[in-house]
Image (spheres, grey):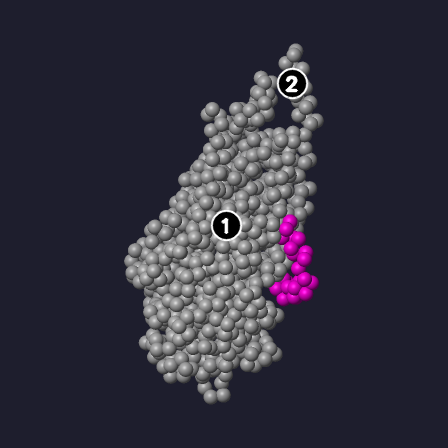
Amino acid sequence: MAVSARARRLIKRRSSARPWGLWLPSALIALGMAVPLVYLLYQASSVAPDVWARLLQTRVPGLIVNTLLLTGLVTIGALGLGLLLAWLVERTDLPARKILRSLFIAPLIVPCYLVAICYAAFFGANGLLEKMLQSFGWEMSVPSIYGLGGAAFVLILATYPYVYVIVRASLERFDSTLLDAARACGASRVRAALRITLPLLVPALSAGGVLAALYSLSDFGVVTTLRQQTFVSVIYQQLTGRYDPSAAAALGALLVLLTLLLLWGQGRIWGRRRFASEKPSGRPAPLVRLGRWKIPALALIVVVLIAGLLLPLGVLSFWLVNSWLIPQTNALLWGTSGNALLNYLLNSFTVSVAAASLAVLLALPLAYASVRYRDRWSQTWAWVSQAGQSLPGVLIALGLLFVVLRFLPGLYATVLLVILAYVVRFFPQALQALGSGLAQVPACLEEGARLLGHRPLSAFARVTLPLLRPALMGSWILVFLSALRELPATLLLRPAGFDTLPVRIWTAASEGFYAQAAPAALGLIGLSIPLLFWLHRGSSAQGSVKSYD
Amino acid sequence: MRKWLTLRLLIVGGILGILVPLTSGIGSLGMMAQSSGELVIFSGRREPLLTPVLQLFQQQTGVQLTVKFGSTTALAQEILQLQETGRPVPDVFIANDAGTLEFLQRTRGAFQTYTSPQIATMPERFRSSDGSWIGVSGRSRVIIYNKDLVNPEELPTTAFDLIDSKWRGKIAVSNASDTDGFVPWVSALRLTLGDELTKAFLLKLKENQIVILAEQTDIRKAVGRGEFALGLINNYYVYLQRQEPDPAVRNVGILYHDQRPFQLGTLVNSTGAAIVKGAKNLQNAQRFLDLLVSELAQKLFAELNYEYPLLPGVPIQSDVREELPSGELEGLKQLPVSPADLGKELEATQQLLEEVGWF
């Protein structure tokens, strides 16, 4: 009796009193994450009207068309490809589905700027492909990889895995009895698919589509390599090529606006049509027999895997082999030794470790507040702190530069600034991973510890934290991986003498020293494979954690 | 205690991850400030072009070098920001365009003056009048062409012929951020022809579907690959392209445009170096500047990078000399402007390019 009275008191206290020790840090962290964005908008608002007028007259119309065309193409392409592949491995009698299921996300191991570099060298005029054709005696010129088509193609390859993963998860949980009911009522196969399957997949498609759209809006490496001008590439040019950052700030603000419009539009289009099956179906849905469609399906899969994975890896390996055969003078000119490479690796490693640890530590209170206390404020803070998610690295660098130069000049051109940029940019990833991990740890366990006399922090550390370990590791690796591959913000913010692997790959490749870029690139890929594997395994193991609940 | 392990690991990782780079960063910058054995250089010149000279300096002096490579404009901005915020600045700034140095000195007073007997031997045209910067190596604007695609007889003799529809979509050029190639040339045109004519010319080029690439390296590679027949470029890129490992892309030719009677002449410009105001390793910086204009370094620039040595008496590289109209830099018909003139026009030219839509 005494215990339950205490429990009631505790629960009451939790719901009424705001836990300031948690709430205040959460608010501060969230606001901190949003500062670069807010200050960027503030800077843009103080841009002189004549600069605005000039920009709107000359650059902006073309840029909006270019950017939207690319984003639209990539979103549609990624949705189509992701949906098709997910359907093939989940719902058809395709052979080797188990292996393919994991293979389809394998293109994620190659950062998209590397894919673009490889494509430019492979498909470009007088490139590897034309050479190969020539060696067979075929003289033909390959259609240009540069411009909208090529950029969209590479970005589709980079983004379809996101759509695929989400849609596949949704198909796995699909309640097939609904389809049976529709068929029993006389609906044709197509009609049933259109009226039942598609609406049920809408949330997944919408989430995947937004990811793909945001990705292509914020891409820097692919559009720069393949000469497609978008907001991001032009902002980067403005930042590195001019003395007055006001045009960059103005264009940055427009890009933010475009991003917000996109998110708002997604809410408008999909928001009202939400269908969800309440419970997963008890029995697996019957597989669709592909019949003679098996051949084209397999052909498509082969093309996707070659284009997304084997081709870039092959080109990189080719360069690596070539670098052993290259004349000595080239290496002398470049002056890159194995020692230097190790140094870049170390640089990449330290900033990524710092960024990952910092991001996870900072995300912990926010995730806890937003999962355990589902009040308006904690939700707001969680939302505010996600500013980095939809912002391209170039804009985060720009915003941080403005803030630092104005308020914290001591940070300018330091490694710490690079780390901060990573934290702001990848904080949402940490928050989301931690949040979903926390949601799976039942609150009653912690409440039990409180009842047994533990203080909040001690209960959290002794009960929740050990259970949270997989989520902690998962979110740490997620941020670490993203930081390891980050390019545009690093290019803009790194101090003298501090090059990371991606920066090195980028500068070497833009000089055309592919032989020097290849070892660094393969090193970067090699480093990410085990981590990505771990993440993938972790995400499929999460189901077992859930069953604990 | 094991329960705390994860959190402690995280905290330790976070602290270490921040402290290590921070202390090493501060340490290296701090040491630069004290020890006389160091020199910090920002270089807008590409790494492979500068590395031989850096190695030479290191061999001669044993000084520890820290170099940041990047675009000249981005590094210039960084130096200005560092100066404004009172942070340690680099000692030497090497720009791929002396005009940028003149511009920075004029508008912000970013550099300190230095003269020495060695520097005094350089021609006056390639030195700043107040001693704030020195020219390091010379280059001229040329047309690069792909010999597989164009016969030498078909070539235009002046850049103004490039508006001919015969070249529609076949010319590559660099954008308004290319401060060591295209931008100074446009400045020179503005100074000789005036804004209106220059603007009209640029618009005609755009009408002729000229393709604007980000950098001159892109131009030489694209022309070498046969993507474009012609490119507007600095002279040494032609020779760099001929050094490509792949023989199929080496077949490029060089054309010094506007060399005939009644034609304007081409632009001869120079790279430059300056000692940054607030430099901590002043002595090393001065030694480095002296080295840059020494016979040895001038020869390296001439031989390895195919640029024109500016120090009188140092010979032009033999391949370059062979294709120069009279075998001498003086024999080249030149637009009558100096790097200092170009620096004054930098911002106005970029503005004009933006109005024309040169991106």
Q: Point out residue A405 in the picture as x, y percentages from the top left corner.
A: 58, 53
Q: Residue at x 39, y 68 (%)?
A: B290
Residue interval drawn in magenta? A38-62
In this rendering, does residue B218 appear at all?
no
In reply to whether residue A94 is colored magenta, the answer given is no
In this rendering, does residue A325 appear at all?
yes
Q: Residues within 10 Å of mark 1 (few under 14, many from 20)?
A: some
For label 1, the SS is loop
Taking depth in this image into account, of B167 and A3 the one nearest to the observer is A3
Q: How many marks?
A: 2
Numbered mark located on residue A414 in the image: 1
Taking depth in this image into account, of B304 and B341 the one nearest to the observer is B341
Of pointers 1 and 2, the one earlier in the residue sequence: 2
Q: Amino acid at mark 2?
A: Ala
Q: Point out residue A526 in the picture as x, y percentages from the top left corner.
A: 39, 45
Q: Residue at x 48, y 71 (%)?
A: B131
Q: On the picture, is A281 further left or further right than B36?
A: right
For label 2, the SS is helix
Q: Which residue is labeled 2 in the image?
A: A7
Q: Amino acid at mark 1?
A: Thr
Provide the major secondary structure of the magenta segment.
helix
In the picture, the quarter occupied by the C terminus of chain A is top right
Q: Residue at x 54, y 55 (%)?
A: B86
Q: Residue at x 56, y 77 (%)?
A: B190
Q: Point out residue A80 in the picture as x, y percentages from the top left corner.
A: 54, 48
Q: On the picture, is A28 further left or further right than B270?
A: right
- Please name which of the two marks, 1 or 2, marks the residue nearer to the observer: 1
